[in-house]
Image (cartoon, rainbow, N blue to C red):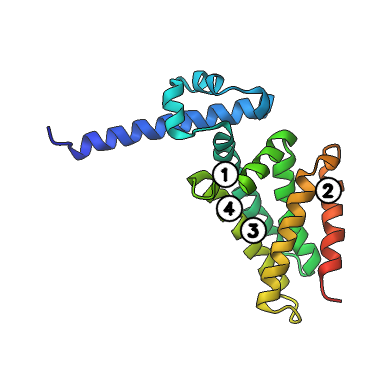
Amino acid sequence: MPVTPRSVGRRERNKQEKFDRIVAAATELFAEHGIDEVTTQQIADKADIGTGTLFLYAKTKGELLLLVQNAKYAEALEQGRADAEAIPGVLDAVMAIVRPIVECNRTQIDNGRTYLREMVFGDPEEPRHSAALAIVAQAEEAIAAVLRRDERVTEDDAATLAHIVSAVMFLSTAASVNIALSVEEITQDIRGQVDVMLPR
């Protein structure tokens, strides 16, 4: 029997509804309990689907966390970009981009640290990991654009410095020794490291 456009539309809507329920369930459970305390069965039950169906959308809890956090990371980056546009100083503008990203990853510390680990060490071919890496690249581009405001910073140097700022941000946010630090303390640590890299 041929598939009509109407039946394809219904099937796609059904898939989207399941996807939305999965994201909502994972978001709520991870926020409330942290990724380590939540099982895929709990997420499936909350989303009102079978675990087999859940694994069609995400094969691991790490992928589910990427699903949840990627949207938050992208929102944080957009906020940072917007804030940076209104700030004339290079260091202050870079930190305007960095701060919401740090805040995003510190809302639930274990989730943020696991997200960064998944992003860095996960399979870059997997779509959710690939999307996370694309957001990191966008953040680095935004930072590089700010760094290029200083005429002494070349295009290549700006890209390299932005990559280093990104690495500093990841390490400062994810490091075990920094678990007890506040967002303010972490951003001050990052600021100090970034300041040393900027031209004098």
Label at residue 116 = none
- What secondary structure is found at the residue carrying circle 4? helix
Residue 26, picture quadrant: top right
Residue 8, given in percent of the width and then of the height, sits at 25, 37
As drawn, 97 above or below 42: below
- State the residue position of label 1: 71
- Which residue does the image show at 67% across and 44% down from the upper left? 116
Q: CA distance from mark 3 to mark 1?
A: 14 Å
Label at residue 186 = 2
Please name the amino acid that badge 4 sits on: Leu
Marks 2/4 in contact by CB < 8 Å: the verdict is no
Front: mark 1 or 4: 4
Please name the amino acid that badge 1 sits on: Ala
- What secondary structure is found at the residue carrying circle 2? helix
As drawn, 106 above or below 81: above
Please name the amino acid that badge 2 sits on: Ile
